[in-house]
Amino acid sequence: MFRSLSVRNYRIWFVGALVSNVGAWMQATTQNWVVLTELTANDAAAVGTTMALQFGPQLLLVPFSGAVADRFDRRKVLLVTQSLLMLLAFGLGALLVFGAAEIWHLYGFALALGIVNAFDTTSRQAFVSDLVGNDQLSNAVALNSASFNSARLIGPAVAGVLIAVVGSGWVFIINGVSFLAVLGALVLITARRVAPPVTAQRESQLHQLLAGFRYVRKRHDLLVIFMIVFLVGAFSMNFPVMSSTMAVEFGRGASDYGLLSSILAIGSLSGALLSARRPAARMRVVIISVGGIGVVSLIAALMPSFWTFAATLVFLGLAISTMLTTANGFVQTTADPAVRGRVLALYMAILMGGTPIGAPLVGAAANALGARSTLIISAVAALLAFAIGMTWLLTERGLRFHREGWNWRVTHVGRPGLDDNPARQSETLTAPISVLRREPDPDPLGESAPQEVPTGVIRLAEPAGARNLADADADAAAAAGTDVEFERGIEPDSADESEAEPDPEQPRDRPGPAPR
């Protein structure tokens, strides 16, 4: 479950990010409570507007944030963005401490936070692939989610207590101090810079920006995931609106509002850890879990008391965390490395960019129809997303169910017959094997400054020059009586082809190069 922590660079990053995430959750909880109770008279629409300003830049800046993540040293980009986020926290904290904050200050802070986060989030997500090899990337993504949700378990509860004890302004100041942990981690991480190939052809900036869009357009599985995360991000993940209005609905205060966020995090952390146990991210898990979000949201809307409502949040957090962690891992592990940053930028923009659309609508619904309407909207959106995923499986992927007595079996486009040999199929239920089985990167330890390659062309095969060099090495090894593939830590092709019995859903990857 924790195999990625064996990598030194990732271990340093994990610890630093965990401390900073606790502060970030403290700030997020405090920000929404200040807007709802200190600067307005329980105006849920104002909370929705704050969220729209904070997450809108994720959508508008996606072409540029993705290009920055692909072309520049991600570690240095994160040093800049994390420093700016620290200064923003100190600035708003000072305004609140001295009693000078007004609602427009919060709106401006949310907008500035959104602009910086547009670049920070994309580079931070892609940075994980620089710290671990492809064989550990899915596990590292899941552990990142576990770190995020562990912080969510602690941060909101601590924020609720601190708001009552020292005031909301000091929570922002404490969050500013917490950024020192992640900045220190970035300084300690060692990364080798790989010189760009001399023959690489430079492309126009527009061509590079559009490369991610063209890649996703040809991947229908990614398009389905993007539609699912948009609906969930827009209408099912407005936790500040849902939790704060439900806390007021039950007559509770700031400490109980923070408690709801922490209870939600119990389920979220469980979902992230369960995802870390899986050997690979599978799209079917995304579709099943989004159906669970719809069912649990509907149940939560019917709960009669604060504690029964809080209990349902555990299962809501479990379903949402499982869906997001698996979707993120699937996108990262199957996207071509040449455009991974831009594809992740699209993913994060669609996930977070739905908030400017959904949050004001959900906030307005809470004002007009009551707090429970926010959960009903969440249920409808999640069930619609589930219907989209199932429709895609039934139509494009040819999913069919067959009953044999008390047992059920399935067929699909990659295995149309019940008696077909799973080892001979060329496609799984959700994607071609050529997409899921990707050869490892040349340098599994990674480099925070990606290689400068022609980003408009997606490299799906090994370059001819590399094959010639490998053939030359094989000839020399044969003359010396050694096996060059075993020296590199790779199994011979014959063993891979004749003995392998790949799982029909997720075939076994070939081992990567030996550690250097």
Image (cartoon, helix red, strand yellow):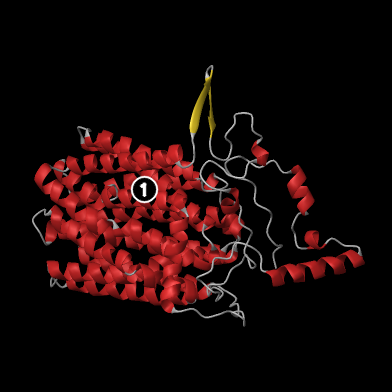
Residue at 53 percent across and 75 percent down: it is 449
For the question of whether residue 411 can be seen, the reply is yes
Q: How far from the left and from the top, in percent, is residue 43?
A: 11, 54
Give the answer, above or below, for where 235 lies relative to 125. Answer: above
Q: How far from the left and from the top, in percent, is residue 381?
A: 28, 43
Residue at 91 percent across and 67 percent down: it is 479
Circle 1: element type = helix
User: Along the line of sight, which residue is nearer the eye, 483 or 306?
Assistant: 483
Q: How far from the left and from the top, in percent, is residue 29?
A: 26, 57
User: Which quadrant: the C terminus?
Assistant: bottom right
In the picture as drawn, the residue positioned furthest to the top comes out as 405
Badge 1 crowding class, 10 Å Cα cut-off, few under 14, some 14 to 19, many 20 or more, is many
Give the answer, above or below, for where 389 lies relative to 478. Answer: above
Residue at 36 percent across and 44 percent down: it is 317
77 to the left or right of 92: right
Q: Which residue is mark 1?
A: 228
> In the rendered picture of this protein, how many numbered marks are placed on residues?
1
In the picture as drawn, the residue positioned furthest to the bottom comes out as 198
188 to the left or right of 35: right
User: Along the line of sight, which residue is nearer the eye, 25 or 431?
Assistant: 431
User: Along the line of sight, which residue is nearer the eye, 466 or 71?
Assistant: 466
Q: How far from the left and from the top, in percent, is residue 152?
A: 35, 53
Q: Amino acid at mark 1?
A: Ile
User: Along the line of sight, which residue is nearer the eye, 412 or 254?
Assistant: 412
Give the answer, above or below, for where 501 lies relative to 464. Answer: above
For the question of whether residue 16 can be seen, the reply is no
228 to the left or right of 197: left
Residue at 49 percent across and 64 percent down: it is 340
